Image (tube, grey):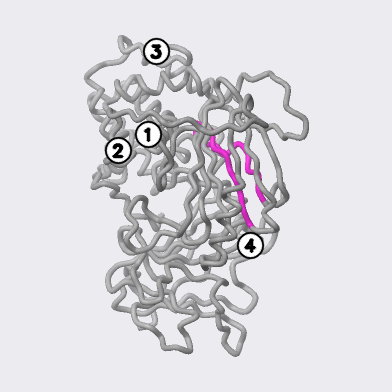
Amino acid sequence: MKLSRRKFNTAGVALLTVGSLPASARADGLVTDFPEAGDQYTTAIDAYVYAYPLVTMEMTRRVITNVEAPKGTRAPMGTLIKLRHYPDAKFRDVTAPNADTLYTTAFFDVGDEPWVVSLPDMQDRYALFPMLDGWTTVFDVPGKRTTGTGAQTFVVTGPRWEGTVPQGMVQYRSPTSIVWLLGRIYCAGTPEDYAKVHKLQDEVKLCPLSAWGKDWQPPKGKVDPAIDMKASVREQVNRMDAVEYFTLFSELLKRNPPPAADAPMLERLASIGIVPGRDFDRRKFDPDLARRVPPAAFGRIMGHFKDSNGDIQEIDGWGFTTKTGIYGTNYIQRALVTAIGLGANRPQDAIYPTSLRSDNGPVKRAYDGSEKYVLTFRKGLTPPVSGFWSLTMYDGDYFFVDNPLNRYSISPRQPLKAKADGSIDLLIQNESPGPDLESNWLPAPKGKFVLMMRLYWPNESDPSIINGSWLIPPVRRIS
């Protein structure tokens, strides 16, 4: 199955995919026909895939929190990050930014003490505050879909905490010490709405349980000069050899225990020196594999695009997955989502179909601003969501596209004009279609581009993208 896929070249890292190897070197997604492909080699590759989310989450936490005080997209541990505006075309911090929600996020550690999160009355505004554990599992999602938009206070406890929950608080138990709060609040992007959302952000509170009800301020962060603040997290993870990687993983296991369902995997990992609660025993690991395992294992992760066994779907030029947020023992899917979309929501909260090429004509060509395209929703068949939907334009590197309207996505926020038959055309092209149709125009660059749709709180009953009863229309080339 040929899958639409993103161009994964963060920080210039060359990706080795299993799909690029000859057939004789592939078996069930594992490289097995090389001379060194003994039991330890294959176990080490499986261990690398299994550990990838926890290691990546930790490296992300280190980079994001390695500052003295909040600034931009970074803040110390236990301190809220409040993004105040949508990025523009000059933004280059992360790929595939969004222009629909403003983030209110934080990393905090519940291993020694619970933390309290207080949310204000959102006044029926769409918002969600998913919490991820160290393995990238979304273990709870307070927000409009699940708990409503009224004011609420909850306490996040660690895996071993046995205290008493204060009266009036809801308890959310994190399976790990690491917790990443990834709050998103819908915003129309106008000056008036920015002001309203900023007020809501400022009313979100975070503190340790021992400080609840007190005049507590987060302390200054301690900057570790040894942490690389320039290279991407993926690059930092990929350049570790297997010994360094498994040493860090074993250390993280001490405070971020694996689920009980992982017992069979842990039995295998013990044979190469990885035992939860203990340091990595490198005496059990062949040092000759230290450099060979990471590229082959990362290749296996990225090769899951081709051999996903249904985890990733492609329909009418759109590639997407409904298997995010909760993974069980599907370790390869969890690792892939970590590599390409760390922080992904549960599918009930958001699905992100992506398209790299139009779906009409004898040859499916990559999108290019030298041509014109249209996405047509027939009457009554716009995306079925209870939250919101949007279509975002990115250049070939997944950044916003500079344009005269400063419009980076199109959605019902624009006064979309319907045709006489009730259908709605989204016009995707470089040049303006004229004043009468500019409300339906998604400006494209002159060169290559990529489209991403965001479906927040998609319907779970018909019609629904989750069960396949609603399909995204193909993007048609019209020039």
Label 1 secondary element: loop
Q: Which residue is mark 3?
A: 279
Amino acid type at mark 3: Asp
Task: For the residues labelled 3 and 1, say whether their Cβ atoms are less than 8 Å apart.
Answer: no
CB atoms of marks 1 and 2 within 8 Å: yes
Query: Can you identify the residue that label 4 sits on?
Result: 385
Q: Which sits earlier in the primary sequence, circle 1 or circle 4?
A: 1
Q: CA distance from mark 1 to mark 4?
A: 38 Å
Residue at mark 1:
66
The residues bearing labels 3 and 4 have C-alpha atoms spaced at a distance of: 47 Å
Image: magenta residue range: 126-143
Q: Assess whether residue 133 is covered by the magenta stretch.
A: yes
Query: Which label's residue is closer to the chain start, 3 or 1?
Result: 1
Left or right of 211, for residue 242: left
Mark 2 vs mark 3: which is more N-terminal? 2
On the question of residue 2 being in view, the answer is: no
Q: Can you tell which of label 3 and label 1 is closer to the viewer?
A: 1
Q: Nearer the viewer, residue 219 or 77?
A: 219
Question: Nearer the N terminus, badge 3 or badge 4?
Answer: 3
